[in-house]
Image (tube, rainbow, N blue to C red):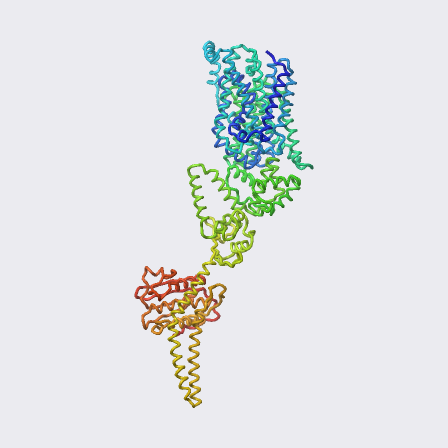
Amino acid sequence: MTLELGTLVVASLAYLLVLFLIAYAAERGRIPSRVTQHPLVYALALGVYATSWSYFGSVGYASQHGFRYLGIYLGATLSCLLVPVLWRPLLKLTRELRLTSLADLFAFRYPGQATGTLVTLGLLAGTLPYLALQVRAIVESARVLSPSASATVLGLGFCIITIVFSILFGARHLTPGERHEGLALAIAFESLVKGVALVLVGAWAVVSIFGGPGGLQSWLDAHPEALRAMQQPAREASWTPLLVLSCAAAFLIPRQYHVAFTESPERDALSTATWAFPLLLLLMNVAVPLVLWSGTALGLTGPADFHVLAVPASRGAHALALLAFLGGISAASAMVIVTTLAMAPMCLTHLVLPLGYARAPGNLYRRLLWARRVLIAAIILAGYGFYLLLDRRAAGLVDLGLVSFVGVAQFIPGLLGLLFWPRATRVGFLSGLAAGTTVWGVLLLRPLWLGGGLPPGATALAALLGFSTVEPWGFVTFTSLILNALAFVGLSLATRPSSEEAEAARLCAREAPSLAAGSVTAGSPEEFRRQLAPVLGPDAAVAELDRALAELGLSQGERRPAELRRLRDQIERNLSGLLGPVLARLAVSEALQVDPQARTALAEQLRFVEERLRDASGMKGPVRELEAVRRYLQRILEELPLGACALGPDQDVVIWNAELERLSGLKSEEVRGQTLSRLPPPWGELLSGFASGPDADAEAQVRLDGRERILRLHRSLATPSGASEAEPERLEGAVLLLEDLTERKAMDARLAHQDRLASVGRVAAGVAHEIGNPLTAITSVAQNLRYEEDPAEIQERVQLILQQAKRIDAIVRALVTFSHAGAAGSQGEPITRVPLAPLLTEAAQLSRLGRKSADVQCVSHCPESLEVVGNAQRLVQVFVNLVTNAIDASPRGGLVELFAEEAGEQVRVRVVDKGHGIPPELAQRIFEPFFTTKQPGEGTGLGLALVSSIIREHGGTLEVDSQPEAGTTIRVTLPKAMARHDPAPPAPVSS
């Protein structure tokens, strides 16, 4: 049976048009996303692996090598077991870094234009035999059904049709980085068509030719040589080369990389692909021996490669033959379309754009789009040219495919180094790739054009190593990969990676970004636009900037250095999908310069770690435990009642907790990554000045919401092990703690005032007694004065009255001075040089106004020239409380002594009594508010608590040394003021 060529052409065009309509409907949203994004669609799209090689060539390969044909598909199945190790890391790199091709991936990891160019040329050389395979398969399969058809017309016609549909499928988008949902759905549909067609032909052959499964078994029993021909080669020859090549090809050949990583759906579909993709290959391969045995049973004389068509054609099954032909069209066209859509952007970014095409005047996007269309046509026509140059004696379709597989396998060492060996260098990769590709080109590619097999020397070496000389690709695979790996490892160890290579290796290994990466010099997105315009053009600069801002969720008013660095990196990633990683890096580096002296914000490292832990949240073991610890510590930090701000080495904000958000009114997401100096007032000046200042503790007054607030600041510097804070270049950051003391200060002021009033009350009785004596004397003298006539006597009486009046005035003034303290407490009170001797004398005099003071002597031993730094009024309150307590604790007729002496840069004051002492269990509680050992009504329990607070405010210390029934000594240390003259010898002052 034959079919007219016109029928074949019309059927092929109609089929391709249906594919295009499916893709168009998906892109227009006519097909819901739950279909286009379904994991099974992704798994079926991976079926582009099965091309004319699988559809036609597997039958021919099985006729010569038996069940070994399965090795090509078992290797692809084994690659699915490597999904966690290889596929997922590659998918993450592709998405995060916008690496749309294998050349982009290698050019990013081994930076340099030479890398992208050599990889592209290597992939192009490996792709051309595969393209020629598709052309040859379509030409010869069409001539099986229409023997009179012209091979030239068939070949050119197929190429022109695929050029048109390739452009329609994929060259209408501005960037190759966008996922073509329509293309993925169309390729999945093609996989169904070719799979169903092949299975139907096999099932029809069993029923029509053998009469069913029983008839097939009877035929095999009658022809044991048929089964033996399938089994014997599988036992005698090695499967290893086939498994290695097909395992690598499952994700390394351009079309597979494009579908697996560039066209992968947003939802995780790899888990489904690990079983659905091998299942598709299994169903297709079940039909291969059935078709082969059917052709043998029918005695077909043509090449076994095309038994899929010849078997139904020989029995007059017109519709099935046409369906089988469409299955072959599906397999070939899918391969050509996807391969050219993968190779055209690769050639554009690594072969054309480096020549300066991107800097030509005009619209950048339009020029790139037309360049891709031209390259699509050029690649397909180059495949046709390779088909014309092929030696007509070349073996079957599978042999052509294996030549491509060996060429692509040369990227295996470089890929393993990319993922698992940060020490690998560009020199090693390029050298290994050049060595392996040279062996491949001389021993496999050259014979395709010139005919013949391995050179005599290579043949002898292959036989010596135990390789079959009939299948040279096994020996070439071994030798090329060995030389490749040796050169790659040896030269990588002999050379040192550049800083750019080291940073790329760190990103490929998903390690934290380097602190030495730098920060952008531009201060706003508007500066980004101005700097990008000369490189990309005004329109493209605006479009790329807006796109990056939208993807990161940033605004045009962004000013944070860390976020601007993220914006720069995002622009570079987006341009990488448009121009390739090499030119994208060059363009961005030229326009958006980085300050090499500035280090990457520590906030970026923390963000990276959080993302890694978030990605690993479903894992078990140490990673899960680490994530639990991180969340626990983060919760503690967020719930801390103090404002906490963690800084990186350059004062960039890493942590800004919830309490500090409440206190400052600044959100963590607004502050994180900014340097302190860029924070809005008053926080920028306050915190940056304190962070870089000499003091580790300080108090500051700031005006917030119309109120004056008092803040205590504490700083702790973070240094690596073995370093000191005196080495600023080794500091890793700092932690600032902020505490709002406003309410506490107000409370302290109120408590102090209440304690003064309580003290005034206790003193009131003593005041009445003290004033009563001179008042009685004044009254008596005044009464007697009426009867005095002698002027001398009168003068003497008047002087006596004045003396007693001055005594009363001194007592009243001391009381008023002590009791007067406003509600503001210590706010605004001056800190000055305070002579200590008069202060202690005044405190002793005030203390004598108490109830027992008349029976207790109080003596001060203090050099007249000794001075301290503080507030006189607050310090009087301290010593009045201490001396009063000492007098209360002393027995009648006792003695309270005050000693003062220098102690380096401090002054030490001791208040000593010989009273009943303090029990050890109460010694640490006497400074607690409202705690007192006195009887009810005799004390408030606030005096010593306020004494402790005032001493701390002055930067001093307070200690108690007490023994029961042996007296108490209270030691107070205060900052010393510089003496103006030598201290005088101590002189006792009696009160």
**Where is the C terminus found, in terms of image quarters?**
bottom left
Q: Where is residue 840 drawn, in percent x and y?
A: 42, 70
Q: Picture quarter containing residue 894?
A: bottom left
Pinpoint residue 243: horizontal percent, then vertical percent: 49, 24
Query: Which corner quadrant of the image does residue 617 belong to?
Result: top left
User: Height in image: 790 above or below 924?
Assistant: below
Answer yes or no: is residue 410 visible: no
574 and 542: which is toward the camera: 542
Can you see residue 191?
yes
Residue extending furthest toward the bottom: 790
Is 676 left, or right, of 537 in this rendering? left
**Residue, x 44% and y 48% (percent of image)?**
636
- Residue 367 lies, in percent from the top left, at 67, 34
* Quadrant placement of the N terminus: top right
Does residue 210 appear left or right of residue 169 in this picture? left
Residue placed most toward the observer, 614 or 498? 614
Image position, residue 924 (x, y; %):
36, 59
The answer to whether 94 is drawn above or below residue 857 in the figure is above
Give the tally of numbered discs: 0
Seen in the image, is 842 located left or right of residue 384? Answer: left
